[in-house]
Image: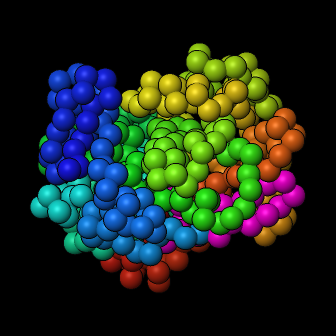
Amino acid sequence: MRVLRCPECGLEVPPLSPSNTCPRCGEPLFLEVDPEDIVREGARSLVPGDLKRVTLGEGGTPLIQHGRLLLKLEFLNPTGSFKDRGAALTISRALAAGWRTVVEDSSGNAGIAVAAYAARAGIRARIYAPADAPQGKLRLIRAFGAELMTARTRDEARRAALEDRSGVYVGHVVEPFFIEGVKDLALELVRSGERFDAIAVPVASGSLFLGLYKGFEELARLGLVDGVPTMVPVEACGFAKLTRYLKTVFLACEEGARSLLADALRLTAVPRLRQIAERAGRVSPYVIVVGDESIGEALRELYSIGLPVEPTSAAVYAAAKHVARDVGGRVVVPLTGSGLKYVPAPSELLDRYLFGAAPPR
């Protein structure tokens, strides 16, 4: 039997209730899946098949080798980021529960993913985003038919979304089904047959870190892996939270500086921070905090080898090179988002079809 369970106080909540945080203590919930459900799926997926009702063909992204790095091309998911994995299950839950409007807050990629999958499911979406998010990302949210609401900062966008009573809040920063959707990334790495010694993982809300961790835990229960591998969290300069819990490695991060490039990591309120820190403490020797100089250099390098990624992916690439030197082995790098969203190409003709009229510039 599947339930949403609070990791803090143990309260159980029905999986299709509109809750994503514990009604008793406020801690973000996890979905508990009966191991027999996973076994019945034959390890083809860590998501029981009856849970996924909405899909755009997410997952199954390529894994390519570049020196000692194994690059997982998550930017090749349908809307250009790994967030499609989580959005597929989030919107599947909404459809199964009969919700007609969902509310999300995002710096861009999660908002795009939720907007696209809501469109696929015929559900309305309202997305709150910071006004300084890349304009290409904001335009895509609107293009998928979602109502876009902008706020001054990322944290203000989240507060506004939480106060919105016109729909059900499915924010990926707390949504347990979003984490469930990410788990198959762990299975894909194992099934690739490639040996690796560590994974560098970008951390903002922590959905990728927690999804990978939970996926490897379940694979261990199936006897397919020995345990959770080394997973090194990567944060952006000026937005690091894990430094109080782990030894820290700084890459071109000056005191008092704040990254302008890594927009997808610019989150200051992290509801699942304790959950991330607890798990990171088990599987990582340190957290890496990356500044814009290192991000920019890594971005140029990635484009020079034909990979059009967003700056956040470059931050993880820079960190992974440090990890590879440190562990003397092979490191998986999830390239989480597409850089094509950062190349604006305004066209009145396209705007006419996407938006009905040319939006104000």
Q: Is residue 29 left or right of residue 208?
A: left
From the viewer's side, name the closer residue of 141 and 102. Answer: 102
- Magenta region: which residues? 62-84
* Figure check: 27 above or below 244: below
Residue extending farthest top: 244
Q: Is residue 340 left or right of residue 5?
A: right
What colouring does the structure picture have? rainbow
Residue at 83% across, 61% down: 66
Residue extending farthest front: 223
Could you say which quadrant of the image residue 301 lies in? Answer: bottom right
User: Residue 227: percent from the left, percent from the top?
Assistant: 57, 42
User: Residue 2: percent from the left, percent from the top?
Assistant: 23, 49
| Magenta-colored stretch includes residue 75 | yes
From the viewer's side, name the closer residue of 30 and 310. Answer: 30
User: Residue 23: percent from the left, percent from the top?
Assistant: 17, 29
| Magenta-colored stretch includes residue 63 | yes
Residue at 49% across, 44% down: 217
Q: Is residue 92 left or right of residue 247?
A: left
Q: Is residue 206 left or right of residue 227?
A: left
Residue at 82% across, 38% down: 327
Residue 172 is at least partly visible in this image:
yes
